[in-house]
Amino acid sequence: MARAADRATSWAPIGAAVALFVLVGASRDNAARPPLGPHGWAPGSWIPLALTPAVVTGVLVMAYGLGVLGTYAALRSAAPRAVAWWPALAVGALILLTQPFGSADHVNYAAYGRILVGGGDPYTTSPIGWHGGHDPVTSHVEPPWTTAPSVYGPVATYLQGLAALVGGANLRQVVWVWQVVVVSSWLATRWLLRRLTDRHARVDALWTFNPLVLGVGVFGAHVDVVAAPLVLAAVLLAVRSPLAGGLLAGLAVATKATDAVVVPAVAAAWWVAARSGSRRFARSALVGGIACVATLVATHVPLGSHVYDQLLRVRRSVSLATPWRPLVELLTGPLSSGVVRTLVSVLAAVVMVALAAVLWRLTAGLAEVGPLGQASRVAFVLAAAYAVVAPYSLPWYDTLAWAALAPLGASRLDGLLLARGLVMAVAYVPGRVLGMTPRVERLTLGFRRHVAPVAGALAWAAVAVLGVSGRAGRPASAPSSGGPPRESPPPSR
């Protein structure tokens, strides 16, 4: 009875969070969800409610709060238990009956795909510039992205093009096909994680039903979810087949540039394997490196050498919710904007390296024995350091860090990252530039400008304090959430 009550305490809030996410995604157009026009053969709104900006903001804040509390309870449960496949499949089906919310990024994806299949160049053509701004898909892109070419890697662009090809001239249909790609990637990541580690309860708590992955990333239909299984597949196959590991690493990097953390992760797997005598490091690195570079060349050549021009143009952007934004606003005036942003970029790089070093120390002993465990540790340290310190960071940038954290053992880092992630998620509700009332806009932007940067700085300080102690430690009541360490992935189930 005690164990059943313990599990109910964990999963009931998560279930409530999922229900609230469905409410936002399946009700009528609102401040969290951009209008997509006629739904065609794709699912449309089926909950006949129109949520006001204030209500939808409150619903999302409640959903994230409940979900994070449930996740934390699941991690500290006295009887941690992974769930079967059917709840994940059921949630995936529900997601495909909703429309994405939390940002308008999915409309951007649809526009870039539409430009690609129409014979244009999404890396030089802005959505509003395609067909004079009258195209039935690209004309729905919302500010501030109407004049912005793509910043995504070629693999992401090809997948966006596939969605546009299948969905045709109907925006909702294009977005729904993209949702299928995202949900499939989310489920594939769970499948890969369950082969990467025996800690299946942590996989379900930190990935499958974590509201900071599920609500932010999967319901939001972000490209970051699509890149995650490529990173994990590269890690999983790196030792067994350096060729396959390198190829998948190249695909991950070509999806989103920040997923380049996969390269040192697979290199760590090769290094640990070589030390155990199973394969020479130089041979693995050579074969895998050639495969990675060849994949990058093959995916980039059809689109040209200017793929990352837009990304380079915006590389010094600073988002409102990071601790760097108050510094930028303080120094701009006495110093020119260019000098300030260069200074912030340099400082951020220094802090990022320092934080990665502290996280590396704190995760010692948390990774499972063998190449896969150490590769997961490297991926987590680098992905988390980037997401937490980068001057331009948004809630869905944490996606890969959550995937890489799941194979590691329980520690105080779990609660710290959940708290920081909750603040970031709340800072970006309802999520759109348009559709808010002045009162809601003052509230949400005030939280984003004044509360979130302080919380981010406190997260840095908390990691530093843990680093001084020399270990993250295991929460007092947190049990081990998996089987014994092992050298190879578990057999297929």
Image (spheres, rainbow, N blue to C red):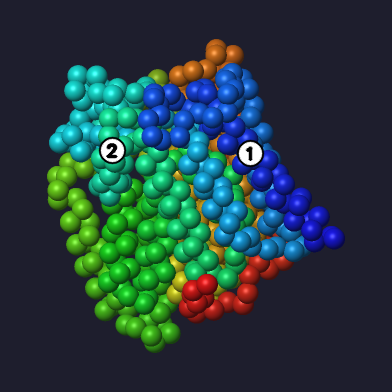
Q: Position of residue 410 (x, y in %)?
A: 64, 62
Residue 268 in sight from this viewpoint: no
User: How many C-alpha atoms fall within 10 Å of the one at disc 2: few (<14), some, or many (≥20)?
Assistant: many
> Residue at the spot x=58%, y=57% of the render?
86
Q: Quadrant of residue 362?
A: bottom right
Q: Quadrant of residue 316?
A: top left
Instruction: Depth check: give the residue in front, 132 or 423.
Output: 132
Q: Secondary structure at mark 2?
A: helix
Instruction: Depth check: give the residue in front, 120 or 455.
Output: 120
Tag count in the figure? Answer: 2
Quick check: 443 left or right of 302? right
Quick check: 81 left or right of 435? right
Residue under circle 2?
164
Instruction: Tell which residue pokes out farthest to the top in this image.
Output: 438
Q: Which amino acid, mark 2?
A: Ala
Q: Position of residue 83 (x, y in %)?
A: 63, 60
Q: Are marks 2 and 1 in contact (CB under 8 Å)?
A: no
Residue under circle 1?
19
Residue 315 in sight from this viewpoint: yes
Q: Position of residue 186 (x, y in %)?
A: 47, 52
Quick check: 345 left or right of 288? right
> Residue at the spot x=58%, y=71% of the render?
198
Q: Which amino acid, mark 1?
A: Ala
Quick check: 339 left or right of 454? left
User: Disc 2 and disc 1: Cα gap in Å?
Assistant: 29 Å
> Residue at the spot x=19%, y=50% of the render?
300
User: How many C-alpha atoms fall within 10 Å of the one at disc 1: few (<14), some, or many (≥20)?
Assistant: some
Q: Quadrant of residue 295?
A: bottom left
**Between disc 2 and disc 1, whose residue precedes?**
1
Instruction: Tell which residue pokes out farthest to the right in this image.
Output: 1
Residue 233's place in the image compared with 221, above or below, is: below
